[in-house]
Structures are given as structure tokens and as C-alpha cells.
Image (spheres, coloured by chain):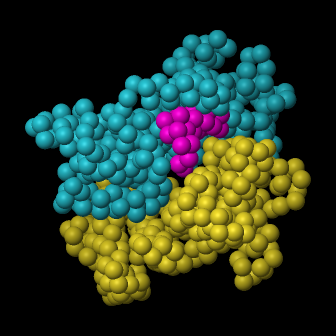
Chain colours: A yellow, B cyan
Amino acid sequence: MKLARFLTLRFVGMIAVLLVVSFATFVVFYILPADPARMECGHLCTAGQLRQVRAFMGLDKSVWRQYLDFIVGIFDGRTFGSGKGAVVCAAPCLGYSFQQSRSVTTLIAQTFPVTLSIAVGAAILWLISGVVAGMVSALKRGRPIDRALMTTSIVGISAPSYLVGLLGILVFGFKLKLLPTGEYVPLLQSPLQWAYHLILPWCTLAFISAAIYARLTRSQMLEALGEDYIRSARARGLRERRVIGRHALHNVMIPVITVFGLDVGTLLGGAVITEKVFSMYGLGALLINAVQTTDLSVISGVTLIAAIFVVLANFVVDLTYRLLDPRV
Amino acid sequence: MTAIAAGTEPVTANASRGSRARLLRDRWAMCGALITCLFIAMAVFAPQLSALSHNNPYTYHLGALSGSGLPHGSLGGVSSAHWLGVEPSTGRDLFAIVVYGARTSLLVGFGATALATVVGTALGILAGYRGGLLDALLSRFTDLVIAFPQLIFMIALGAVVPTSFPRQIFMIAVIGVFGWPSLARVVRGQTLALRNRAFVVAAEATGASPAHILRTAILPNLTSTITVLATMAVPGAIGTEAALSFLGIGVPPPTPSWGREISQAISWVSVDPWYLAPPALALFIVTLALNAFGDGLRDALDPRGSGR
């Protein structure tokens, strides 16, 4: 398949998936009994007032029409109501939170840097440590270091992230008083403080996720080392470093990248648990907050953003595949 | 991945005997199986077990607390009356909470896995055996479900599903509904491979009905893969239940849940860190045991000893 054709097909596919995901989200949240207009209007709301609020928020239209308004708003912005009291939500408008009197896009833009900071640092840390641990384990198969690494990794897989995070806070924060236990400092405000405050969340996520990568790398590496092309590379007298570094590692990276892409995509949509444990207000915390106050427009906006990241990550993975493995 | 290669061999009694022996020799796996059984027994006999210490997970014991809401004594209030200490601010017995919490965790964990396994197997076989347009549609549908931001969607759904709907069933449904795609993919791949094997083609040539072929030729060759994948999915489902409860959208109080206890322990961790230990260790140990058993099972059924 030519690259251009591949890109076009994938792009169309991505848009289709996003439309289905957003419509499903939309339908689910608007069919269920929670009524945003009633919440906005309050308990002492007359039927007439409720009808006015509904019309103002655009909830009096059919589901299809509302969904269309939502999609159009992303590209063209929306205006709720008219005249003096109108609320303008500029494009790209992912909805308007009447509870917080802000557009969902603004809320997401405010919280996203936090999630991005957590995700990127943690992802780099876990990819490197996981792959290195897995390779060491595979090359020293059966030796004590292999057993130690694999035991650590099954602990990492089994321990929930919030638990590891809490233990980190307990030991490094409260007992040793080495690291801050939470709170996000913007990167531009102080890069050093930013990194200092993020060490614990990064390490927590990295410990959990690296375990999966270590096991995956180990099994892929062991499999690769048994293959004919490795044997013939060795037979040709290539140095061991080159055999491992070039030929075996190449084979290992393909499945690792698949898992990595999905993990990063998912994490960018909100490091829900990590954010809660370390009291950082990112996308995940925004969502949890919206869930507690039943702020439906925020919920559907964040869900759509999270879906976009997953779909994009999938796309990047497929593109990397083509570069790594010309057969695909 | 490599489990596919192992599973496509026609089933023979010898092979399954060999893997059983391998599994029995695996000390890690047997330990895991034993601990899992203990936890299941704990969940089943929760009322009897907590009655042993004359406690239940609901009664407040304000006498066990000091004025500031912290448990009396060391180790979070461990005493002969409260074996694992008490909850700060309410004084509820933590042993009873942990024992009853196992019911929630295991019910949702096994229930969701069962649902995901049935759906994944059915759709995987259907796509792999029928092929053609149905396969294309089902495969795209699988991709779509994978593209859903699952935890986010579960959290969002948890917020809008009415509280009158039984929460355990909601959790089983929501975790199960997002759990089947990976299984369906593997089952589809294996079915596709089996379809072209001589013994399946021969069965078709003799005029056997699809139902008969599925029952006698396809399903028996899929069981080992499905068993391994299902076993390895249980700890994940238990973890998701705990995570949802941790985030405050699991089973409603006062039904005991490990995840909710852990989440409450956050606010007490600086003054009463022992509160964290019982629910957290219970969750960790049962997940570890299930993972160890799942690992051993996979190694036993896939003698090449690799795979993920």
C-alpha cells in the first residue's frame, strides 16, 4: 500500500471512530435521567423557568439536533441564548459548563498541562527502565538477577498505582521528608520545582508500568534469540553487542511500541488515579470533579478528548510499524 | 502471541496430562492457587469468619477511638477484640470489613471476567469461523471498543447511572463490556487458523453441521487459550473494581469495599498509616496470587514457555 493511500484510509477511519465514540457518549449521557437544566435551575424551579433554561441550554431539541450542534460547535463555536444574556462559546467549543461558567475547552486547556507533565515524564521513565530490565533479564536468563527482576515485576503488575503512590507519599514525604507529597507547579513558573513535585508521580506510574514492559521485552527477546536469523548473525561472526543491539532489539521493539502507544494515549486522557493521589488538578481530576457534580458537558468533553488521544496514539503506532517493519 | 501456536494442535489426552504435571510442579503457581482458594473461602464464609471475632462490618465502636477519632493503642487499634484494628472516626472493625470486602472484589472480578469471556469467545469464533463481511464488521467493532477511553467512560457512566440500579451488577456489566476485545482478537485468530486445519476440513467434507464442528473440533482446541486469558483477566478486573471504588463510584457505603477503604485511608495516612494496611494488603495479595497462578497456567499450557 502506498503511504498516501494508507494515511488517507487511516485518517478517514480515525474520524469515523471519533464520531461513533462521541455520539455514543452523547447518547448515553443525554438519555440517562440526569437533567442538566434542572440542576442549573435549582430546586425551586417552576415548570416555565425550567422550559426557559432548557431552551437556553439547547436541551429542548432532539438528540440528533443536539449532537449536530455539538459537532458544529467544535468547528464554528456556539452561542447559548440571545441578546444581552447570551453566552458565547468560541470554537473549538466542546460544550459549556454552566456550573463553572466556563467553556469546556477552557477547562480542558487549563488542566491538560498537568496531565501532560505527568504522562510524558512517567512514560519516558517506564519505557527505558522496562526495556532495559527486560533485556538484562533475558540475557541473564535463570540467573539471580533475572529472578529478582521478574519477582519485582510481578509485584509491580499486582500492586495498584494508588497503593504504590500512597506508600511513596508515606515513606518519602512524611517519614523521610525528602519529596513533596503533591501539588503541581507549572513548568514555566519554575522548571526545577516542577520536576521536584513530579518525581513521586513519575516514579509511581513508572514502577507499575515498567513491570509490564520488562516482562514483554524479556519474552520477546528470548523468542528472538532462538530465531534462525540471530543464529546466522552470530555464525557470520557479528559481535554479540551488534547481534543484540541491532537484530534482536529490532524484533522486541514492535510489540513494545504497540503497548506503549496505547498506554500513553490512555494516560493523556487523564491520569485519573495518580492525579487524585497526588492532589494535582489535571484532566482526570477535572473529570472526577464533574462526575461528582454531574456536570454532563464537562464529562462528554473530557471523554471525547480522551478518545482523540487513544485514536491518535493508535495511528502513531501504525505509522511506526510501517517504518520499523516494511512488510506491514 | 505464541499461545496461538500451542493452541492449534489438536487436543490429545497426553498433552493435557503433561501440562497438568507441569502446573503441579510450579510452586509459585500452586501457591497462587492456594491463596486464591483461601480468599474465595473467606468471601463465602464472611459472616461466619467475622462472627469468630464477634464483629460485623457495620457497627460503630466509638469506644475504640480516642477523642480525635484515632484508634486507641498501637498498630491502628489492633487488639483481641479487633484483630486488624478499627477504622478511624467510626471504629468499625477492619477484619470484618476486609473479609466482607472480599465478597465485593471477587464477585465483581469473576463476574466481569465471565461476562467478558463469554462475549469475547462468541464474537471471536463467529468472526473467525464465518469470515467475510461479518468478520470485517466484528473486527472493526472490536477496534472501536478498544479505542474507547475505558476508565474515563466507566467513571462517566458511574456518575449518571441511577443509584437504584444494583451497583454490583453495574460494575460487572461495565468492566465486562470493556474486557472482551483482546480475548475476541486472539480467539478469532485461532479459529481462523483452525478452520483450515485438516481435521476441520475433513469434518466439513463429511457433512457435519457447523454446530457440531464448533463443539467437537474448534472449541476443544480453544479451551486452553481461553482458560489462560480468562485467568489472567481476573486480577485486572478486580483491580478495576478497586480503582472505581477508590474513585468513589463503586459499591455504595456501607457495603464494604477494599478500594473505598484505601481511598479513605489517604486522608488518614499521615496520622494513622496502619489503617491502609489491611485493605491494601488484601487487594495486593489476591492480585499477586491470581497473577502467579495465571502465569503458571500459561507456562504449563504453552510448553515453549514464552508469550507475554
Left or right of A175? Residue B305 is left
Q: Is residue A7 above or below residue B2?
A: below
Q: Nearer the viewer, residue A324 or B49?
A: A324
- Tell how many labels: 0
Q: With respect to residue A58, does B211 lie above or below? A: above
User: Which quadrant of the figure has residue B258?
Assistant: top right
In this image, A20 relative to A142: left or right?
Answer: left
In depth, the one of A43 and A318 nearer the eye is A318
Q: Tell me if I can see residue B39 in this picture.
A: no
Residue lying at 32% horizontally and 42% vertically, measured from the top left: B121
Q: Nearer the viewer, residue B123 or B225?
A: B225
Say which residue appears at 31% left-offset and 50% top-offset.
Answer: B193
Query: Looking at the magenta stretch, what is its main secondary structure?
Result: helix
Q: x, y (%) of residue A233?
A: 62, 67
Q: Is residue A262 magenta?
A: no
For image coordinates 78% across by 31% down, the residue present is: B76
Q: Is B128 situated above or below B271?
A: below
Taking depth in this image into account, of A261 and A290 the one nearest to the observer is A261
Q: Is residue B159 above or below residue B223?
A: below
Side of A156 where B23 appears, left or right: left
Q: Which residues are magenta?
A: B283-308
**Where on the picture, by quarter, is residue A46?**
bottom left
Q: Position of residue B70 (x, y in %)?
A: 78, 35
Q: Is residue B85 left or right of residue A18?
A: right
State whether residue A193 appears in this view: yes
Tell me if residue B295 is in the magenta stretch. yes
- x 57%, y 13%: residue: B48
Point out residue B129 in the picture as x, y percentages from the top left corner: 23, 48
Residue B31 lies in quadrant: top right
The residue furthest left is: B207
